[in-house]
């Protein structure tokens, strides 16, 4: 018995060693774990493929701020178009803050939206994040305001703001064939409409020696700023004969300042907002340039959806609607005339 015990323990030790070596390999891998190696594919941007059958496509619509009546109307129109086309619009309110608008686009990218329609607060402030969206395979169309410094943008849809500014300039020449001193209210610095509308205005008035811009200041596309800046400009230049504003909010602020000063001088706006159209009808505003924002928004949405559906790309990829100066003589041609009750 004593001679067998060492042999018994030796055999047991060998058996335990064999079991320890073989046991881990014996069980089959759980079925649920088999696809683990393919997990990264699930992280690919949703925009790389159309939404699954039965699911509505999600399009992010990011704008400088819902505090601007122009963008409120544009958002309403793109949502109406989306309802007709059976897609979902996710509105991102930039709150007139480039950082807020940028953060909203980052969130949209992370959520894997199918497309983005963007009106950037400034031409360059969102370049990096828009490029990030494009690189992630999300089709992006800019609307109204252009974006610089990106490659691969699907399209830009907007009004020809230079032409709109030229129409403001031509109105000044028509009103003052013998010359005049005028005030110019500029939009948000760095915003493409502010840049292009001013360029168009000066294309027309600069070659005419007897038209002088005696006060040119930004009022940030804002009514309160339009009022304050106009007050200051009129105080320094009481002989100013007209005011040209890069949007209607500033123009309506200028109208308040003109009335408060006891003056009666023409003010020309841009956007043809309902309130501005009413002011034109009442004789408080000479005119406003219509740029058809509802059609801009709907066109931008259709452009994104066409690309998602079958890869259609617009040629050319700069789609410009022709603006039109609205005065009392052609009020019915304004996109929002009915909304203004006219």
Image (cartoon, helix red, strand yellow):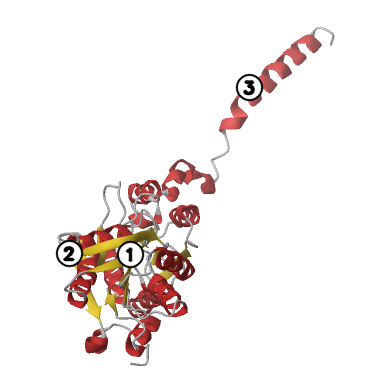
Identify which residue is drawn at 52% across, 48% down: 31
Residue linked to disc 3 = 18
Residue linked to disc 2 = 204
Q: Are marks 1 and 2 in contact (CB under 8 Å)?
A: no
x and y percent of residue 236 in the render?
41, 63
x and y percent of residue 68 in the render?
44, 70
| Quarter occupied by the C terminus | bottom left
Please say whether residue 309 is visible from this viewpoint: no
* Image quadrant assignment for residue 83: bottom left
Residue linked to disc 1 = 184
Of residues 7 and 156, the one drawn nearer to the viewer in this rendering: 156
Local SS, label 1: strand
Apparent side of residue 106 relative to residue 248 in the rendered image (left or right): right
Q: Is residue 342 above or below residue 76?
A: below
Q: In the rendered picture of this protein, how many numbered marks are placed on residues? A: 3
Local SS, label 2: helix
- The Cα–Cα distance between marks 3 and 2, rounded to whole angstroms, is 95 Å
- The Cα–Cα distance between marks 1 and 2, rounded to whole angstroms, is 14 Å
Q: Residue furthest bottom?
A: 341
Apparent side of residue 193 relative to residue 113 in the rendered image (left or right): left
**Nearer the observer, disc 3 or disc 1?**
1
* Image quadrant assignment for residue 165: bottom left
Q: Residue furthest right?
A: 2
Local SS, label 3: helix
Q: Is residue 147 above or below residue 69?
A: above
Q: Residues within 10 Å of mark 2 (few under 14, many from 20)?
A: some
């Amino acid at each position: 018995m004593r001679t067998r015990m060492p042999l018994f323990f030796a055999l047991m030790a060998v058996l335990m060693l064999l079991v320890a070596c073989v046991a881990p390999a014996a069980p089959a891998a759980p079925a649920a774990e088999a696809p683990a190696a393919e997990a990264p594919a699930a992280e690919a941007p949703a925009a790389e493929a159309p939404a699954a059958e039965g699911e509505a496509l999600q399009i992010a619509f990011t704008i400088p701020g819902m505090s601007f009546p122009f963008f409120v109307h544009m958002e309403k129109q793109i949502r109406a178009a989306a309802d007709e086309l059976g897609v979902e619009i996710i509105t991102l309110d930039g709150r007139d803050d480039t950082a807020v608008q940028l953060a909203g686009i980052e969130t949209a990218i992370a959520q894997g939206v199918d497309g983005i329609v963007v009106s950037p607060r400034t031409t360059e402030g969102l370049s990096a994040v828009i490029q990030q969206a494009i690189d992630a395979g999300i089709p992006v169309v800019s609307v109204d305001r252009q974006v610089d410094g990106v490659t691969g943008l699907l399209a830009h849809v907007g009004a020809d703001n230079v032409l709109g500014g030229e129409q403001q300039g031509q109105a000044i020449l028509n009103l003052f064939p013998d010359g005049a001193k005028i005030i110019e209210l500029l939009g948000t610095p760095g915003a493409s409409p502010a840049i292009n509308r001013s360029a168009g205005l000066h294309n027309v008035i600069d070659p005419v020696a007897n038209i002088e811009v005696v006060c040119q200041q930004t009022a940030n596309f804002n009514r309160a700023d339009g009022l304050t800046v106009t007050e200051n400009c009129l105080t320094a230049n009481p002989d100013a004969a007209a005011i040209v504003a890069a949007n209607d909010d500033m123009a309506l602020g200028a109208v308040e300042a003109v009335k408060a000063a006891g003056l009666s001088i023409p003010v020309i706006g841009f956007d043809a907002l309902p309130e501005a159209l009413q002011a034109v009808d009442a004789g408080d505003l000479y005119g406003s340039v219509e740029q058809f924002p509802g059609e801009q928004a709907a066109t931008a949405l259709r452009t994104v959806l066409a690309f998602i559906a079958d890869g259609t790309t617009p040629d050319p990829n700069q789609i410009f609607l022709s603006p039109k100066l609205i005065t009392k003589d052609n009020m019915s041609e304004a996109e929002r005339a009915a909304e203004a009750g006219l």
